[in-house]
Amino acid sequence: MAKATKPSGIQPRKRRAALTPEARENQLIDLAVNLIEKRLLEGTASSQEVTTILKLGTTRARLENERLAKEVELVQAKTEAYKSGVRMDELYEKAMAAFKRYSGQDEEDGDEY
């Protein structure tokens, strides 16, 4: 592991504390990418760092990220459809009970014909 050194004359930027875990994760990713960029420019990046950056820029990685985003949208849509179906069932049951009351049937009588 390389020893962390402070370059002379360059002060690190002060960042505001992240308000959410996702924001904190994004801050750390940003710092890591900036460090790798610096190492690439200086010619000191490891082969793992170079490979990781190359993978991030490939068409396959972009397509996979898009696919994951679409899957999330699909799961959200399915969840909403399920909730809507449950609400429709409840409304149907209430409507049937109201029809029975309007026709003079007790709800306890059930479907006796």
Image (cartoon, rainbow, N blue to C red):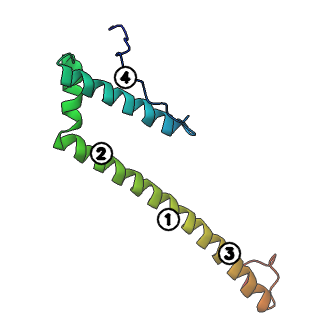
Mark toward the start of the polypeptide (2 vs 1) = 2
Q: Which residue is mark 1?
A: 81
- Marks 2, 1: nearer the viewer: 2
- Marks 2, 4: nearer the viewer: 4
Q: Which residue is mark 2?
A: 65
Residue found at x 58% / y 39%: 19
Question: Residue 96, relative to residue 8: is it above or below?
Answer: below
30 sits to left or right of 62 = right
SS at badge 2: helix
- Marks 3, 1: nearer the viewer: 1
Amino acid under disc 2: Asn
- Marks 3, 2: nearer the viewer: 2
SS at badge 1: helix
The location of residue 50, given as percent across then percent down, is: 19, 24
Determine crowd level at label 3: few under 14, some 14-19, many 20+ residues with C-alpha closer than 10 A: few
Front-most of 80 and 99? 80
Q: Which residue is mark 4?
A: 10
The location of residue 34, given as percent across then percent down, is: 32, 29
Front-most of 80 and 60? 60
SS at badge 3: helix
